[in-house]
Image (cartoon, rainbow, N blue to C red):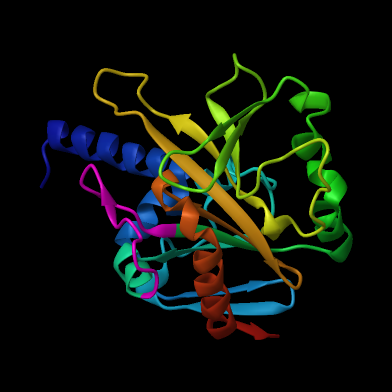
């Protein structure tokens, strides 16, 4: 029989466990209960094997940091850095002891919403240096053929990466994937025990499926190859219900 102190300790641990579960849900607890993901989103059934999952359910933490919306039903996935490097020579697999896996979110959108993102107007200000980008700063990204675009000299904690130099006098490409690579931002480093790092995320569409994925800044040159790898994965994972 448990003593009074033991009972109190167990009660405290129980409420901590429940509190953590309610706060971070499947993002953390999913690592303990990790397994195959079978999720229906819209008209699709996604069957993702255990070694390509992050958690059983959709990830609220991932959804909060994305730029594509925060309340959609979604499922998350992971493709190991080792697997990517087999298909993409030169892909950087680790940084500061951390594996640079490709992690992503799959959602299903309606046609109208997708069209809004695919219209050239969506990135017109960015390309022509108008509106929010009227004071933009463009810099070449070192060791690559990519360009960083900051909104202005003072706002340098976040930026967009393009594969073409945006010029007001040149025609903006009609297809986003021809020039838009990713958005990046500085993360962490606020406390004495945290290290700052750069997180980049990109996205693309497969019919009415939108895929947003995360990768290291040093691997942005391979974004087209990574999109193709994910496309191939989705063709295996998804089935029409």
Tag count: 0
In the rendered structure, the answer to whether residue 225 lies left or right of residue 91 reads right
Answer with left or right where residue 220 lies relative to residue 7. right
Q: Tell me residue 89's x, y (percent).
A: 35, 68
Q: What's the magenta region?
A: 87-102
Does residue 89 belong to the magenta stretch?
A: yes
Q: Position of residue 160 (x, y in %)?
A: 61, 38
- Up-down relation of residue 118 to residue 143 (above or below): below
Q: Predominant secondary structure in magenta?
A: loop
Q: Position of residue 210 (x, y in %)?
A: 68, 63
Query: Residue, x 65% and y 19% (percent of image)?
Result: 152
Of 208 and 239, the residue lying toward us: 208
Measured along the vertical axis of the image, is residue 154 above or below residue 136? above
Q: 127 and 123: which one is in front?
A: 127
Residue name at image x 39 percent, y 40 percent = 20
Tell me what residue is drawn at x 14 percent, y 37 percent. 6
Q: In the drawing, does residue 84 fall left or right of residue 64?
A: left
Using the image as rendered, state which of residue 232 and residue 168 is in the foreground. 168
Side (left or right) of 91 relative to 209: left
> Residue, x 66% and y 61% (percent of image)?
204
> Is residue 201 depicted above or below 191 in this figure?
below
Q: Where is residue 80, by image quadrant?
A: bottom left
Residue 87 horizontal/vertical position (percent): 38, 74
Residue projecting furthest to the top: 154
Quarter of the image with the C terminus is bottom right
């Amino acid at each position: 029989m448990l003593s009074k102190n033991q009972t109190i300790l167990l009660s405290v641990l129980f409420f901590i466990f429940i509190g953590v579960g309610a706060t971070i849900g499947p993002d953390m607890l999913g690592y303990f209960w990790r397994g195959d993901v079978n999720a229906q989103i819209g008209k699709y059934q996604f069957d993702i094997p255990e070694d390509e999952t992050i958690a059983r359910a959709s990830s609220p933490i991932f959804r909060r940091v994305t730029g594509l919306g925060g309340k959609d039903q979604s499922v998350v996935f992971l493709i190991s850095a080792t697997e990517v490097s087999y298909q993409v020579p030169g892909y950087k697999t680790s940084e500061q002891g951390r594996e640079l896996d490709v992690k992503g979110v799959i959602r299903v959108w309606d046609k109208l919403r997708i069209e809004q993102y695919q219209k050239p107007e969506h990135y017109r200000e960015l390309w022509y240096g108008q509106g929010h980008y009227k004071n933009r700063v463009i810099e070449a990204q070192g060791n690559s053929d990519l360009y960083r675009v900051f909104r202005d000299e003072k706002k340098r904690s976040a930026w967009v990466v393009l594969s073409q130099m945006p010029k007001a006098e040149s025609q903006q490409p009609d297809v986003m994937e021809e020039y838009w690579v990713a958005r990046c931002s500085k993360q962490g480093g606020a406390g004495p025990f945290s290290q700052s790092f750069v997180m980049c995320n990109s996205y693309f569409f497969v019919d009415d499926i939108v895929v947003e994925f995360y990768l290291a800044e040093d691997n942005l040159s391979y974004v087209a190859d990574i999109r193709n790898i994910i496309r191939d994965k989705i063709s295996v994972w998804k089935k029409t219900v």
